[in-house]
Image (spheres, helix red, strand yellow):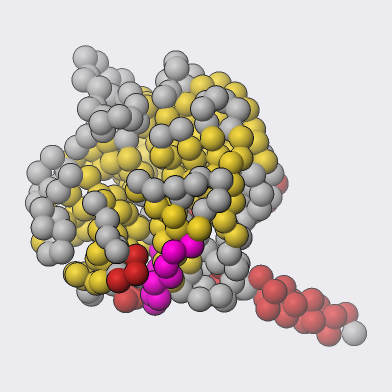
Amino acid sequence: MKRSMFICLFSLVVFSFGFKLSIGDTDSISKIYLIGSTLIRTTPGSDIRLYDIENPSSPRQLSTIIIANNHDVAVESHYMYADDGQNLNVYDIADKSRPVPVDTVIGTFDHYLVGMPVDNMPESGFSGCNSCGRQEDAVAPTTLSGQTGGQGGSLARFTIIDHYLYCVNTYNLTIYDISDPAKPVQSSVTNIGWDIETIFADGDRLFIGGQRGMYVFSITDRTHPTQISQFQHARSCDPVVVEGNRAYVTLRSGSACGSNGDQMDILDITDIENPVLVRTVSLSGPYGLAVRDSIAIVCDGAAGLKILDVHNPGNVRQIGTIGGITPYDVILSGNLLVVTAESGFFLYDVSKLDKPVLYTKLM
């Protein structure tokens, strides 16, 4: 009797929430972060690796930080912020070959970071660092134009704006004052819903992607976000990026995401209080994306990377592709495209957006 009851309960959980956690689920995907010529790549459950990609044809690994349960990073000046499931850790990476742990904000991601109670997470903290030590007379890395930090992919949960670090977990937006970058101070925590996955900054607005919709917040007051609008959709995994008066949202079915179609929605956000769907583009199994000059670079899972001309939403055209990889997220910076994929990460020359040329692949 007890065995039958267990089987019934187990089946109910499997069919209601999904059972398999594959690398395709966003919190099992290696995140990428670019600041100057330094590429940072996370390996969930394992480590964080720093690379010098000044010569993208011949990148050099600089160091490895062993940190359990890490999912995201962001950088301000020469300080890197990295979660370990429960805590926010700070590393001085002025000398990127010798990162130095300098601070930990304990319990900052209480309750949930990726949908798991922290009581069930293994203990972590500063679990180790390969080539860590003291740095001397190091030069701070350059930053991208208009930002005090670097640039993450569209699956990012961390972003930095005007010396504030914004972090989303499953249901909260937590803000840290990092005006003293070595010592973050929590400023506020705002409940924003449920099944929250990604965060994207555009000026004084945050676009937050969740499995139930896109949420738009004003951060005119940097420490007190206020919700402006919401665009609801059927349950689906949901990163979002913005260019001009359009937002681009990819929806993926399967696994924990639901089963409501695979597509990219193009939204008109001219009236930010009332986002309007203007076009749905059918895809195979999309993940992250980037958009520049109305060219969308979309990671379409096993179908490869697709390059779409979205100048005219009524006539979206595929103008290029990268096959033979299963891409999950991208960073587009100048003529460089960084792709994190199932089999490693790839660097491409996109001086011609419709004809990417591979620089190199790293496992």
> Does the segment drawn in magenta span residue 4?
no
Q: Residue at left 49%, top 19%?
A: 183
Residues 171 and 280: in front is 280
Frontmost residue, 283 versus 180: 283
| Residue 109 falls left or right of residue 39 | right
Residue ID at (79%, 76%): 9
**Residue 275 can be seen in this image:** yes
Residue at screen point 27% across, 60% down? 311
Residue 363 position within the rendered picture, expressed as x and y whole percent measured from the top left: 25, 59
Taking the magenta stretch, the answer to whether it contains residue 284 is yes
Q: Quadrant of residue 354?
A: bottom left
Above or below, 40 against 353 in this view is: above
- Residue 278 in the image: state x and y as whole percent: 44, 64
Q: Is residue 20 visible?
A: no
Measured as percent of width and height from the top left, residue 142 is found at 22, 27
Residue shown at 50%/34% (left/top)?
166
320 relative to 314 in the view: left or right: left
Q: Quadrant of the N terminus?
A: bottom right
Give, as a single range, the part of the protein colored magenta.
277-287
Q: Answer with the quarter of the image where residue 343 lies.
A: bottom left
x, y percentage for residue 320? 19, 69
Q: How many marks?
A: 0
Along the viewing direction, whichever of 229 and 126 lies nearer the viewer: 229
